[in-house]
Image (cartoon, rainbow, N blue to C red):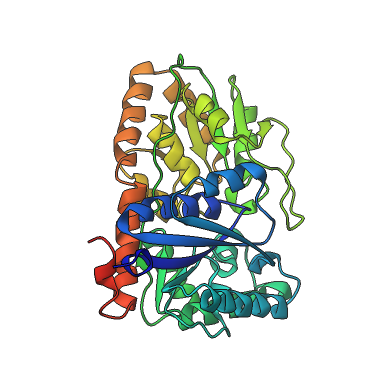
Amino acid sequence: MTERTARLRLLMTVDTVGGVWQYATDLARALAPLGVETVLAVLGPAPNMAQRNAAKAIAGVRLVETGLPLDWLADDREQVLLAGRRIAELACHLNVDLVQLNQPAIAAEARFPVPVVAVSHSCLATWWAAVESGPLPQDFDWRVALHAEGLRKAGKVVTPSAAFAAATQAAYALVVAPTAVHNGRAPLTCPPTAMHDFAFTAGRLWDRGKNIATLDRAAARLGLPVKAAGSLAGPNGDRVTTEHLIPVGHVDEEDLAGCLAARPVFVSAALYEPFGLAVLEAAGAGCPLVLSDIPTFRELWDGVATFVAPCDHAGFARAIEEIVGDTARRLTQGEAARAAARRFTPDHMAGDMLAIYRTLLPSSTPDRVAA
């Protein structure tokens, strides 16, 4: 049996703007021992050198920088449709067995030569419903329509949480609910460090769905620092300013691990969060969690986190103060978070995704990959 016929080849789209990059590289790494070779096709901004090196270090992974636009940053409908056609052509050229689109909109009108799994990590329709009010802006309409069509064209739709699966099904009137496969993340390697008194948040700070304004107001009420990692300006032109949070900019994995090693109180006031990799990273490091009371966080961290109404800045400040002021509680909640985080591993995620791939492949193909 040749190496080519012994393995399954997967083409997976990826972008470098948010958590999809981490998700895709973790998934590809965990799929490799299961007999899956992954081609990562980059849409949108090109990866930086650190990202390129990280991807190339994964066994069985090939990185292809397409130069194609990312759906939610595209100027018009035709750019997204072009991306779909080019990815379909790439799938044919590379003779892959399966395509996983982490941007479902590009499946809207493309003709793929193999089965397609669409993974919806977020979308404008559900984001708008959680963050804003009133009718969708005109610029959102065509993007939402393409996303909806892409979901319907896919052989299988996956979301990173059951809560987001329900929101997605409702937003797009899907006959069949998406399958929830929780994201996975290996614990960061945190150096031995004394516990320090501060609160910490991380993510796309510019995204209004992260609700940084509430944390900024909470920080004004606290006598301890609240640090925020991530960009204050987004590639779509959105920008946020802070008066009381301490922005620390982009941090690489090593710096993030060093920060989380001090076991700060990790806080998120998100209005919209389909999963939340930053929360998982903090939990894996043993940080106590103070989270907004939204369905996703309840699904993943109920019984572990302290929950606060999303816009209750005084409630967030009070919760942080109470945890920092009670060392025993802080340690107990941190260890409970660490224990809960062990449920969300890359291996578990890869196993669940491989089971989904098998349902779409010809009956002879699943025998080629590990059971």
- Quarter residue 75 falls in: bottom right
At horizontal 56% and vertical 78% (from top left) the residue drawn is: 88
Residue 295 sits above or below residue 91 on the image: above
Q: Where is residue 248 in the image (x, y as percent from the top left)?
A: 66, 31
Asked if residue 311 is positioned above or below residue 163 in the image, the reply reads: above
Q: Position of residue 112 (x, y in %)?
A: 51, 82
Left or right: residue 156 versus residue 125 is left
Quadrant of the image for the N terminus? bottom left
The residue lying toward the viewer, choosing from 156 and 94, is 94
Of 9 and 351, nearer the camera is 9
Residue 315 seen: no
Q: Position of residue 145 (x, y in %)?
A: 60, 80
Q: Which residue lies furthest to the top in this view?
A: 194
Residue at image point 34% right, 46% down: 345
Would residue 163 be visible to someone looking at this image?
Answer: yes
- Residue 20 in the figure: left or right of residue 345: right
Residue closest to the far front: 2
- 269 or 103: nearer the eye? 103
Quarter-wise, where is residue 76 in the image? bottom right
Residue at point 62%, 36% (across, down): 229
Q: Where is residue 322 in the image (x, y as percent from the top left)?
A: 44, 24
